[in-house]
Image (spheres, rainbow, N blue to C red):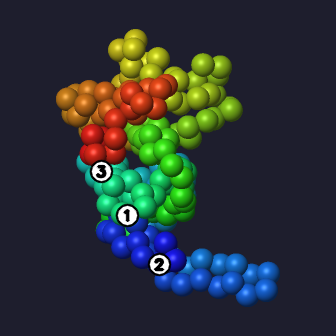
Amino acid sequence: MVLSKIRHKHLVSLIGYCDERYEMIIVYEYMEKGTLRDNLYNTNLPSYLTWKQMLEICIDATRGLHYLHKGMVGRIIHLDVKSINILLDENLVVKLADFGLLKTEKSDVYSFRVLEVLCARPVVDLSCPRGQVNLDEWGLLCKDKGILEKIIDPSIKDLIDENSLRVFSEIMEKCLLEDGCDRPTMCDVL
């Protein structure tokens, strides 16, 4: 019932569902460009996302999350914000999928992994050297050392304006604060 009432440009729309015997299926609208994860890591896809497009994707996702947090009666918290749940339509407009019901919106702020977009690698990569396995920890360390630009995805590294990177990294750092009370709201992130 809740999903059927949600209508927003940056949230997938529920088309229908099936709940017969042991079959339970939820049907959403088709998203032509797939997941953000596929577009960041899938080497079989052409690398077509520019820095500006990636920023727009982050902004669209933030707008969707902000609507879930503040725009609905009963407040919905996504709880699973990750690149596989950020879907792209044919025009690269974001629609969030797989959101649930929870109480604390600051968990969405933390899990809104903007560093994943900047570095085009998974948040946790066990094949990386120690100290680089967790992208959040490694990214914050690199930012503190003033070498964040060294871990940026090479395909966009030269396209990023220095001021844009500074603002992006400041937002990233605030989203990753340990104490949820200190993290910004999605409105602040937007």
- Which residue type carries mark 2? Ser
Q: CA distance from mark 1 to mark 3?
A: 23 Å
Task: Give the camera-side residue of 58 and 5.
Answer: 5
Task: Give the camera-side residue of 86 and 2.
Answer: 2
- In which quadrant of the rendered image does the C terminus lie? top left
Residue appearing at x 33%, y 55% in the figure = 70
Q: Position of residue 150 (x, y in %)?
A: 41, 23
Front tag of 2 and 3: 2
- According to the picture, the residue beneath numbered tag 3 turns out to be 59
- Which residue type carries mark 3? Ile
Residue 45 numbered tag: none
Q: Residue furthest right?
A: 22
Q: Residue furthest front?
A: 74
Q: Earlier in the sequence, mark 2 or mark 3?
A: 2
Is any part of residue 64 visible from this angle? no
Left or right side of 98 for 148: left
Residue 4 numbered tag: 2
Front tag of 2 and 1: 1
154 up-or-down from 30: above or below:
above
Task: Give the camera-side residue of 163 and 64.
Answer: 64
- According to the picture, the residue beneath numbered tag 1 turns out to be 73
Q: Position of residue 149 (x, y in %)?
A: 36, 25
Quick one: label 1, few (<14), some, or many (20+) residues within 10 Å? few
Quick one: label 3, few (<14), some, or many (20+) residues within 10 Å? some
Q: Earlier in the sequence, mark 1 or mark 3?
A: 3
Task: State the SS at label 3.
Answer: helix
Q: Position of residue 42 (x, y in %)?
A: 54, 53
Left or right side of 127 for 46: left
Q: Look at the numbered discs 1 and 3 and tell me whether their residues touch, using CB distance below 8 Å.
A: no
Residue appearing at x 50%, y 29% in the figure = 136
Is any part of residue 2 visible from this angle? yes
Q: CA distance from mark 2 to mark 1?
A: 14 Å
